[in-house]
Image: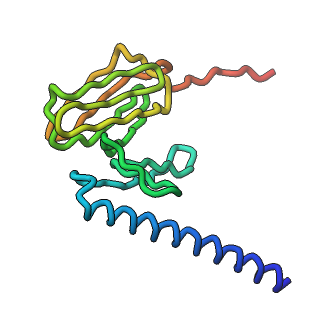
């Protein structure tokens, strides 16, 4: 039994060493290019972890750097930090768009997707898959202090269920 665990731990150690090697190489390439002045703008990578109603974790990435096993991928647009709040009758999408003028923001929606993009010196782009179907024509958006809030009505609203009396024979 001990040999099985030893073998498993050795394989896990090799796997972790390979991940460390990939991150080290990615960091070396990243800093080498940055020192040469190849990026010329801030580089951002982050993620948030929340839990859905089913208890499963939801991981959302943001920024303009995407990790890859071949090295970092630098995008022209930054993916903004986005939070999705599902309420009884609506879905709210809150996106951080610092340094953007209201006139430079474009928002479009379908029944299951919200697209946020900006033009100008600060470019952002994000496609948000919505957790429920919505009526795009009901969308309302507000922008203040670098924060965009879009509210959409759900197609199927949740109404409290009324019980039905059952007669006992």
Residue 27 shows in the view: yes
Decide: is 23 above or below 107.
below
Instruction: Compare residues 124 and 85 and report the one nearer the observer.
Output: 124
- Image quarter of residue 168: top right
Say above or below: 1 vs 18.
below
**Seen in the image, is 101 located left or right of residue 116?**
left
**Residue 36 placement (x, y as % from top left):** 26, 61
Q: Residue at x 27, y 33 (%)?
A: 149
Work out whether residue 159 can be spotted: no
Q: Measuring 26% from the left and 64% from the top, which residue is drawn there? A: 35
Frontmost residue, 135 versus 28? 28
Image location of residue 102, percent across then percent down: 15, 29
Horizontal and vertical percent position of residue 80: 31, 43
Q: How many marks?
A: 0
User: Horizontal and vertical percent for residue 97?
Assistant: 23, 40
Q: Residue furthest top?
A: 137
Q: Residue at x 20, y 40 (%)?
A: 122
Q: Image quadrant for the N terminus? A: bottom right
């Amino acid at each position: 039994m001990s040999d099985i665990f030893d073998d498993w731990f050795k394989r896990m150690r090799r796997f972790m060493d390979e991940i460390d090697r990939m991150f080290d190489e990615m960091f070396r390439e990243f800093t080498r290019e940055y020192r040469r002045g190849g990026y010329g703008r801030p580089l951002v990578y982050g993620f948030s972890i929340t839990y859905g109603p089913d208890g499963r974790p939801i991981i959302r990435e943001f920024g303009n750097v995407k990790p890859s096993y071949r090295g970092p991928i630098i995008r022209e647009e930054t993916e903004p930090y986005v939070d999705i709040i599902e309420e009884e009758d609506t879905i709210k999408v809150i996106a951080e768009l610092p340094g953007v003028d209201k006139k430079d923001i474009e928002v479009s929606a379908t029944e299951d997707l919200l697209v946020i993009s900006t033009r100008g010196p600060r470019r952002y782009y994000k496609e948000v898959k919505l957790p429920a179907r919505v009526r795009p024509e009901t969308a309302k958006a507000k922008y203040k202090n670098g924060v965009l809030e879009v509210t959409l009505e759900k197609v199927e609203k949740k109404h409290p269920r009324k019980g039905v009396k059952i007669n006992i024979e």
